[in-house]
Amino acid sequence: MSLDKDQVQHIATLARLELSEKEYAESVDKLSRIVDFVDQLSQADTSGVVPMAHPLDAAQRLRPDTVTETDERDRFQQNAAAVSHGLYLVPKVIE
Amino acid sequence: MDLYDKTLTELAAGLRDGDFTSVELTSALLERIKARDAQLNAFITVTDELALAAAERADAAREAGEGGPLNGLPIIHKDIFCTRDVKTSCGSKMLDNFISPYDATVVARLSDAGAVVLGKTNMDEFAMGSSNETSFYGPVKNPWNLDCTPGGSSGGSAAAVAARFGPAATGTDTGGSIRQPAALTGTVGIKPTYGRVSRYGMIAFASSLDQAGVITRTAEDAALLLGVMSGFDARDSTSIEEPVPDYVAELGDSIKGLRVGIVRQHFDAGLDAECGSKVKAAIAVLESLGATTVEVDLPNIDLSVPTYYVVAPAECSSNLSRFDGVRFGYRAEDAVDLLDHYCRSRGEGFGDEVKRRIMTGTYVLSAGYYDAYYLKAQQVRQLIADDFKKAFADVDVIAGPTTPTPAFRLGDKVDDPITMYLNDIYTIGANLAGLPGISVPCGFVDDLPIGLHLVGSHFAESTLLRCAHQYQQHTDWHTRCPEEFR
């Protein structure tokens, strides 16, 4: 196994994913297989190759900094589980 | 001929000549979907009321001598495209309760042209899968054999078109998700050049690879839709400002003198022998129409799948960080604090394959591994793109199989991620290099359809569509309908 349970636990925390015990066991096995599989990239000679930034070598466009969108907060908040006075509610952050 | 058996182009003529109205057509297809989709599970949502209202508007527009190029014609959308006031789930529990407040550009452009949306199709969760088995809504079945997968991730779209639930459906393709299901269901699927079609409102999986396209039964229909969908959109930062040709007008031109490249690695031991001989026979048809074949070399193509499984999960882990259970999407109950809220909302809202890819991506981007995996993969990606560029100096298209085998049985590959990933071995290269690709039905193996895959240089959609159309003028694979759905 190229990954152990501690590593998978660390990755899951970074990714903000809660996993069950069963999921941990399965993830160690399957993620290890994926990592072993992508390890074959190390064989490729890439000395001097500039990593690809865009498949068409295009650059990001700029636009004038002007207001283009209207306020639709109430519509958008209809998809939220908990809102109050136009604010999104989350569990208490500060005691 | 029944209405459901007609192509988009034939339906357009029928509407124009007054043979039937859009309301009649829409009602007939909605009835067919309602009566038959229990067998396939191709739809997540059927938008019958919206469809009939749109059909009425289209009929009124036609009476008044108005209406766009797709006025009154049916379209089905993959459930990855945000559709205003309609549930847009992306095949996930995470978005099971999400009603989109806006239209994706693809949806808006097709609707503005008069298209009538019949519903939203089932798909692998967040487009991550090659068999439709990762969907929260259960797998889609292949209309040619109900024990088999239709492929994925646009499996619902492909199955719906193959079963004649509608003449055309949208799809998205990150590593083969339009072309692979098209091949496995006997339909045409085109993935355009990266940046050709706007990604605005198309729920992101891997932003540097994702591209929208269509699944139809003929290249002619694909040309008609692609002309409407394509073009610059200021709302997509990677949209390309390049004029859109008249794809339909160029279909009739001969392919005499077309240089077809054959890649040796695409016909090696990984390919089912019968699939190989059918694909070679299809290439012989192109030769009989005046094309010439040349062997081309893509020395790094064998590394395309591992490259993809670094780049795509990395981008997915970043894109899917937006699902936090706060502003929209699934929210876990009774979280004790914010971290618990994030971890449980995401742990409960995402399925196994999505979690696996988020974790793979998190790993390859994490401190100490970034250079060895992500940077390395982007370098190999550049090598693969350079190989294609060199090849296209000598050829106009590259032809080969779309998939290594015909459709496999549901359940056969779910336990081994690597075997599943290798389904896309022939299609992933085009995504890595941003190239357009099309799959065209080219025969049957064990009574299951397979596809001929054509890849072109950037913005060569016209060449691909013309080549596919000319092939379809001389073959009849695309006219076959699954027994069960006649």
Image (cartoon, coloured by chain):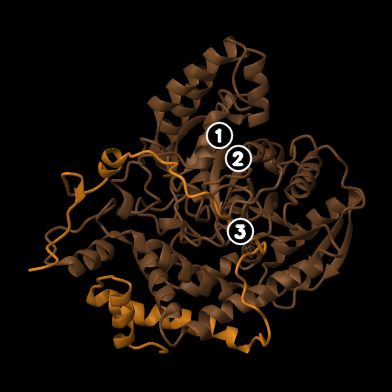
Chain colours: A orange, B brown
Residue on which the image places disc 3: B406
Which mark lies nearer to you, 1 or 3? Answer: 1
> Which tag, 1 or 3, sits closer to the chain's start?
1
Task: Tell me the chain of label 2.
Answer: B
Give how far apart the Cα atoms at labels 2 and 3 are. 30 Å
Which mark lies nearer to you, 2 or 3? Answer: 2
Residue on which the image places disc 2: B229
| Residue B77 locus on image (x, y percent) | 49, 40
- Mark 3 is surrounded, within 10 Å at the Cα level, by few (under 14), some (14 to 19) or many (20 or more) other residues, namely many
Which quadrant of the structure image shows residue A45? bottom right
Q: Is B428 left or right of A78, judged from the image as shown?
A: right
Image point (71%, 42%), residue name: B244
Give how far apart the Cα atoms at labels 1 and 2 are. 7 Å
Residue at mark 2 shares a chain with residue at mark 3: yes
Q: Amino acid at mark 2?
A: Met
Labels 1 and 3 touching (C-beta < 8 A): no
Image point (40%, 75%), residue name: B362
Give how far apart the Cα atoms at labels 1 and 3 are. 32 Å
Q: Nearer the viewer, residue A89 or A40?
A: A89
Taking the image as drawn, is residue B143 in sight?
no
Residue on which the image places disc 1: B110
SS state under label 3: loop
SS state under label 2: helix
> Which tag, 1 or 2, sits closer to the chain's start?
1
SS state under label 1: helix
Task: Tell me the chain of label 1.
Answer: B
- Mark 2 is surrounded, within 10 Å at the Cα level, by few (under 14), some (14 to 19) or many (20 or more) other residues, namely many
Labels 1 and 2 touching (C-beta < 8 A): yes
Q: Residue furthest left?
A: A95
Q: Residue furthest front?
A: A65
Report the number of discs. Answer: 3
Image point (33%, 72%), residue name: A15
